[in-house]
Amino acid sequence: MAANTDSRVTITYDPPPNSYFFVGETPVSVTASDVSGTLSSCVFKVIVKDKCSGDLNKDERITPADALIAFKCYLGLDECPDCVDMNKDGEVTPADARCIFRIYLEVPDCQQDSDAALYKDCTGHSFYPGDTCSDESCIAEGMERKIFEEWKKQFLSIHNLSEEMFAERIEISDVKITNLWWRIDYVFVLDWVRSQQSESVSFNESSSDQEIEKAVWLAIEKGEQFDIPHIVSKAVVEDAFQDCGSDMNIDWCHIDFLNVSGELIVKGSKPLDKARNQAILPGGYGPDCVRAIVDVSTGELLRCYTEPCLIF
């Protein structure tokens, strides 16, 4: 992205020129101003596709021939090209050949399966609500919808989201009213990351518009970075944990935003001395655990520390 060279016009870019763009979509804003102070701006998307598409023979299409290359690699009958590990599990198996064949058949690919496997044992509301409430038809008329509309208006403003970005990143699981509490459960979605979220608003049947507006404002966390431009790959996150300790148990079920600062993070932990811990308390728990926190938008290890295993 070239910088402006016309001295009569000042153009700024966010992200700035020469920025690195990760796989996925990144919004780029451009603002121009002339000597009179007149401003003009626009926003566009930079889309970076994963080079590992399944086209192993580089003929610019994906066919059963590519799947055969992957299977021969697994059998040791031929050389293994780059990107043959399609499901990114660290090894070449028949599953990689099957993944390429599924792409050829235009059915859900193996990376989607791999992503879903992260959350298959998680509890709580669904990590994959899909179209459950994509058209907002699950929201009842009356107070339930009134609060929802106020929540959405403030949510977009507070988190600097457009309607389009909201539709791409927020999948609503449920909206309901119980005992004068309005609650919304939803999933934040960005690439492979899925993060369960919820907000609850206190009200009563006589609440005025101003009271509902204030209650919604108090319910929404202000620092959470729903507008982050991108995240790093799962492999980069896993590598970051290695800087704290090998074979850490990563808690994919609770990817969440840090309080106050708002970074999207995931935690991991493991006993420092499993044998000693088991001797103290059955089940592998004890007083000595190493814990780590990694920022999934940068792949940075934010914290590595020890504390009792029963405290997370």
Image: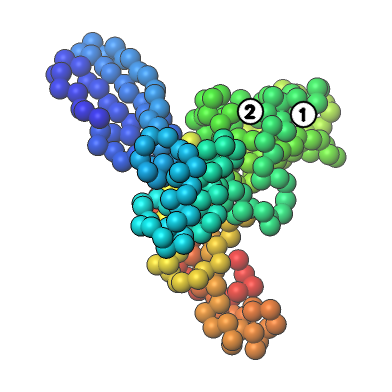
Residue type for callout 1: Cys
**Quadrant location of the C terminus in the rendered image:** bottom right
Q: How many marks?
A: 2
Is 35 placed above or below 290 here?
A: above
Residue type for callout 2: Lys
Q: Nearer the viewer, residue 270 or 259?
A: 270
The residue lying at 40 percent from left, 32 percent from top is 47
The earlier-in-sequence mark between 1 and 2 is 1
Q: Is residue 192 left or right of residue 202?
A: left
The residue lying at 51 percent from left, 51 percent from top is 97
Res. 185 mark: none
**Residue position marked by numbered label 1 in the rendering:** 138
**Quadrant location of the N terminus in the rendered image:** top left
* Residue 207 found in image quarter: top right
State the CA–CA distance, disc 1 to disc 2.
15 Å
**Residue position marked by numbered label 2 in the rendering:** 152
